[in-house]
Image: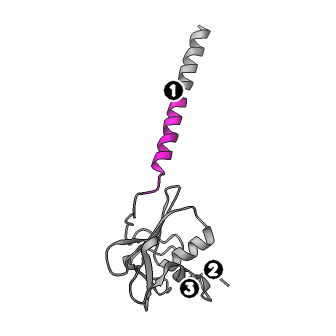
Amino acid sequence: MTARILRRALVLLLVAGGVVGAVALLLRVTNQPPEGPVTPAWDEDTCAHCRMHLGEPGFAAQLQTKDGDVLFFDDPGCLFEWVDENAPRVHAVYFHHLTEDRWIPDDRVAFVSVPRSPMGYGLGAVEEGERGAISLAEAREQVLSEPGARGKP
């Protein structure tokens, strides 16, 4: 009778191990980065940096981590500052076009000055090559070097 109990216990352990392994595999598969930009829940999702609601699509940005997390930002400047402060493992970055309903990947984005943006950084994303636009690197430097930038002395 003891041998039968030991066999049942062994079978239960093997089944439990299989279930735990399957759950771990499922979690690994579902934590993959998305393919392309993700649409936020406008006026519900909040900025990962300043915690304001994403209410103006023309200024939104998103960062996708290699772990599969998608972080939204209500202003390009918030994304620049958050990345500078957190140094994430980046899979992809997208900026919402200033005037069109589409996302621009970071390797094709440029920025124009605007009189007003949600957090006052004054940048709007456009397609690279737009007249008067500055590069991603120039926009990032502009935000991070401004006196009084969020979190900076």
Amino acid type assigned to the residue bearing label 3 in the image: Gln
The numbered dot on residue 142 is 3
Residue 128 drawn at (x, y percent): 41, 79
Q: Which residue does the numbered mark 2 point to in the structure image? A: 151
Separation of marks 3 and 1 at Cα, in angstroms? 57 Å
Is there any visible trace of residue 50 in the rendered image? no
Provide the residue designation for mark 1.
15
Label 2: element kind: loop
Say what secondary structure mark 1 lies in. Answer: helix
Q: Earlier in the sequence, mark 3 or mark 1?
A: 1
* Range drawn in magenta: 16-34
Q: Where is residue 143 in the image (x, y as percent from the top left)?
A: 56, 83
The residue drawn where x is 52% and y is 79% is 77
Say what secondary structure mark 3 lies in.
Answer: helix
Vertical placement of residue 39 versus 147, above or below: above
On the rendered image, what quadrant is the N terminus found in?
A: top right
Does 130 lie within the magenta span? no
Give the quarter of the image for residue 104: bottom left
